[in-house]
Image (cartoon, coloured by chain):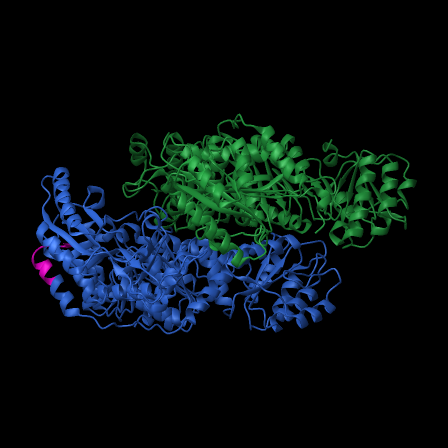
Chain colours: A blue, B green
Amino acid sequence: MLENLFFPENVAVIGASRQPGKVGHDILANLVKDGFAGDIIPVNPAGGTLFDLKVYPSLREYPGTVDQAIVAVPKPHVLSTVKDALAKGARNVIMITAGFKETGSEGAELEAELTDLCRRNGARLVGPNCLGLLNTGNRLNSSFAGSLPRTGRIGVFSQSGALCTSILDLAEGRNLGLSKLISIGNKADINENHMLEYFAGDPDTDVIVGYLENIVAGDSFIKTATDTCSIKPVIILKSGTSKAGQKAAASHTGVLAGADTAYGAAFKRSGVIRADTFEALFDYATALSMQPLPKGDRVLIITNAGGPGTMAADAVEHAGMTVAELETNTATSLREKLPAAASVGNPVDVLGDAPPERYADALLAAQSDDSVDAVIVILTPQAMTDPRETARRIARSIDGSKPVLASFMGGKEVLPGRQELTAASLPDYESPERAVAALKVMYQYATWKNRPPRVVTRFRVNRRRASRIIGRNISNGIFQLNESKAKKILDAYGFNILPGRLITSAEEAMEYARGIGFPVAMKIVSQDIVHKSDMGGVKLHLATVQQVRDAFDLMMMRILQQVPNARIEGVYLEKMADPGLEIILGMSRDPQFGPMLMFGLGGIFVEVMKDVTFHLAPITQEEAIQMLKSTRSYGILEGKRGQKGVDIPAIATGLQRISQLTTDFPQITELDINPFIVGDIGTDPVVADARITLARPLENKRG
Amino acid sequence: MLENLFFPENVAVIGASRQPGKVGHDILANLVKDGFAGDIIPVNPAGGTLFDLKVYPSLREYPGTVDQAIVAVPKPHVLSTVKDALAKGARNVIMITAGFKETGSEGAELEAELTDLCRRNGARLVGPNCLGLLNTGNRLNSSFAGSLPRTGRIGVFSQSGALCTSILDLAEGRNLGLSKLISIGNKADINENHMLEYFAGDPDTDVIVGYLENIVAGDSFIKTATDTCSIKPVIILKSGTSKAGQKAAASHTGVLAGADTAYGAAFKRSGVIRADTFEALFDYATALSMQPLPKGDRVLIITNAGGPGTMAADAVEHAGMTVAELETNTATSLREKLPAAASVGNPVDVLGDAPPERYADALLAAQSDDSVDAVIVILTPQAMTDPRETARRIARSIDGSKPVLASFMGGKEVLPGRQELTAASLPDYESPERAVAALKVMYQYATWKNRPPRVVTRFRVNRRRASRIIGRNISNGIFQLNESKAKKILDAYGFNILPGRLITSAEEAMEYARGIGFPVAMKIVSQDIVHKSDMGGVKLHLATVQQVRDAFDLMMMRILQQVPNARIEGVYLEKMADPGLEIILGMSRDPQFGPMLMFGLGGIFVEVMKDVTFHLAPITQEEAIQMLKSTRSYGILEGKRGQKGVDIPAIATGLQRISQLTTDFPQITELDINPFIVGDIGTDPVVADARITLARPLENKRG
């Protein structure tokens, strides 16, 4: 259905203007100049002609039906204009006019009315507050962005109209072709999800590039992006990575997870390649649209200069890839072709006086060698260097089996070579480091594409019991679940909870402790006490009945001394866990992307080092293990220098169970198991403390 | 004296050739074409004329004296040619010919002979294996690098000749001017130190750019670079950052400090700006050569598009700088000048239809505002945008009080604007992120320049005692000093050592323990036991005479069971330290830069997290504190969540004492204090274990 957006039968420009520089003029001019083959229908109350086209004073006066309506009239006229267009059968409306949602609630209401109007009439709406769209395939330029770029295989969507103009200008400067470009503006109707889906099926597009400031709907984004990335690469620049700030949150997980963390996790999950800079966006797109994906990470460097070769090797190593070595027989036969002073190590140094043939010989050797997955070709413009002819020979030697990226370093001298490279679909970069960065992204995308199928384990749990506890607390207006309640829910989801319960008197404590056996731990239960241990609200290793009695009395006295009005429910008394490694498992629900799981080592590792990783639920066993491996402290789990390792799969299982619990219950907004005590391999980790925060029902959301 | 290199009275090209593409031809052609005003003397056995110049069959036949001799003859003729040149009074020799040190020992001998020959005759030698040099000031092009670049304020030296060609070509492409460029090749005589010193005093050079693969002499580099950086900025790209690998070292410090760490520390110490990529080298140089240094880190962004403004703000925050806010009265008066929809927050958004005046108004406001230290101006080419005129108005509005960097984003459309910017000495970048990266480097350099004077404390120590211990051990052929010896040396340098000594029998141990008081620690002393604790060679918290006896007997038995031939000197028995935080202080002597100090938290922080920092000795109190602050685990030293902090200045003092010790004794190659136990503020930290490695005297360096 979006097909029609880019292939309309005719286009009406409502608000067409005589005055260059006015949006309504420039759109009409672009449509005419760039040679759109369908009918172009200018509309302006003044009538007359424009670019030899009859101008209709109103769309109502146009005799036929209208397919695409581009609206560039002042805001007060927008609704009536759109009604006219819909009455004429418009299947899509491109709303250039601004002043809607972005200006406040009045604008938002008008935008909603407009969207509703289009929807009821079965028309799609682009914008409002957008720049339009263009399609190089049928020479459609329904925008005020400037001229059509050259035809190519990159499809672009952008939430910023201004960035579209820079993208078009940059593409022109780099000799890059685009298939289609669309400015999605306020995204009242058409948004990133539609565009991903459309470009995924678009035969003219090989690589999708997007600029986003936010995402309309997190869950459908992940689904759509995953599907799209399975077909072709998607590269997104997401701005606003810094201001996100910390959310006000009750849990560690909530505090540690900024909004941008969730975007990072969502992109990673769905295979989206994230560009951190404007240049990277097209550095990556160029490589992905021109070259095949690498099968591995072994990179061979071919250079006519030692220094830049070393720079490239540095970059390969820093990127976490491997500097390849030619196999012995390839190296031997290449050595015969090159001068004695040349090096067939890596970098392969074809020497400063290298004629084009030497590059070709080295490249052919690299392509034939099973130890090489990708090739970086570097050229510096030395006295004997012929950049143009070298580029041609390189282009002719390419067999398409492996990605080849070039860096012809310099300016004017190497320019003819660069142009040859681009013409031959060989990506070229100003510096070896940028070529390597693009190659790294290709390798990561290839790895994502070849990932094993995701199998999310469903554990047998007592969902009804958890549901009852959650429901009862919400009914009672309790949204912060204390240790005792949180543990009951975790128990229902198969976590190992030590015997323990809420106790309200010293006598009860003594009797209960005798029943479960020593040593025991005692913790205050009160919604008014946040940092229990700082207040003397935690006693561990109580070994006798007498110690239990003393601890109880002392705790009551001290807490009430410090917080006289504290509402104390009692103490939680439980059997002490065996010693082990303390870790934190948590979940913080992102408003866009849902449950985001956290893992980190306990104590200072989280509090000081911030050494934590995140992953969106639902999570697989393999992804959970990856979460652990991504922390700097992973070595501690494995065991080092005589220290025993802990049961790593058991931690992964814990994460998977939290994943299942928080996917099952959207009411859970935050969850912390802190600490989760993990022991030797084969032992079941213990939930030593936990808390859960539930969502307040919507009607309560006042203050 | 180097002045003469760039301002010779005349130049002889020995090996001048008729054949284009030959080095000897191209140099002559460059000298002639680029218009060097002094005499040019071609020399070739064939004689005749070249470029209307008489060619001398031999330099001996030239009647006058020669100032600069460029030698491009085959290697066998090099020595006689240089002799001829020196006989003619040559003050400098530029040796283009290759095949010297870089090809092995025979070449190295010839190079040494050549260097010696020049030195004895009072001539300077550039190269061998170099590309020559050039000076835009007097139009001297003594190179085969291509045409002279435009005149500018950037001086370049490069260890790679090939990179010189790319640099010249890049400068041409970016409209960048250079003052002088020199290819220093094998650095037989002229090296980076000479060039730093020369460019520091060169009135034509404002910014120095260098490419290095190694450094000739570490200590003189630091001194020269520090002096130079105090005068003008130095930016260096150092390649070979990845291959360094781990040195085989006995200490933690040695293992953790790769060779590149030392370069990083040396650059940081001496104020050198390090570029990680070829592009960054000139991104930074452009900004530093064109704009004043910022006085602070508050960056105001002016943009005609929201998205790119956000991208710039992200980059500012990620760079650790501050997104500035205009002061209220500046904001108010700017608001009056801009349309209602414009934003005077940060970014200042002058809107998509901004004419040049709006940019000028915003820029004038930013310059007048005391809350702004630097300005980034972003332009996207929208329908109403006039990039050229906007650039002109920006240029006219600059008052030079604060750095202004631009990013005109796009290609062909913005090109006229970019050219205006460059012409007006306004640095322009393809993306906002690159502009911010350059600004960050300017800010860091400004901070370095304004650093407080370095005052290295000299502690009163017992240097003679340390000297005696070191001397005696070296005489006895002992280079690995055990705990007992290492502690004696540290004791002499004012470290807090607990009572302890080497013990050889159980009886002696019991008696000694009774004397110093319990609890005590016992550690095996044997050069054959590396991992003492893994072998049962460490017993802590021994509280009674009986426990001491048992520990001694058990330790002897177990060690000999595991390493039957271990040479056991005895055990080291000492009073237990009070509990505290375990940290590691260390030193590893870099062959180039001397003692490199290390700090890290003990145990897993070093072993798993590699959370360590390095600094070259001698170190100041302030630098030592900075070392602590640069670790991710610094919060642990400060104390977190009810944990008490430790005595941070005491740790800094420990680092300073190691600095003094290892500066005093070059014989110490490695030193580890592990752990150094630090307690509450006001307590003296304790050296709980230590080892020292001494250098083997040179004559022993056989196997």
The image shows residue B268 at horizontal and vertical percentages of: 53, 39
Residue A35 counted in the magenta span: no
The image shows residue A548 at horizontal and vertical percentages of: 16, 50
Q: Is residue B157 visible?
A: yes
The image shows residue B694 at horizontal and vertical percentages of: 62, 42
Q: Is residue A253 above or below residue A623?
A: above
Residue A480 counted in the magenta span: yes
Split into 4 quadrants, where in the image is the N terminus of chain A? bottom left
The image shows residue B547 at horizontal and vertical percentages of: 40, 47
- What is the magenta range? A471-481
Q: Nearer the viewer, residue B237 or B644?
A: B644
The answer to whether B266 appears left or right of B128 in the picture is: left
Furthest residue to the left? A476
Q: Which residue occupies 53% across, 35% down?
A: B490
Furthest residue to the top? B460
How many badges with numbers are in the image?
0
The answer to whether A254 appears left or right of A527 in the picture is: right
Q: Nearer the viewer, residue B117 or B556?
A: B556
Furthest residue to the front? B507
Q: Is residue B487 above or below residue A256?
A: above
Q: Nearer the viewer, residue A254 or B689?
A: B689
Q: Nearer the viewer, residue A206 or A549?
A: A549
Q: Is residue B54 visible?
A: no
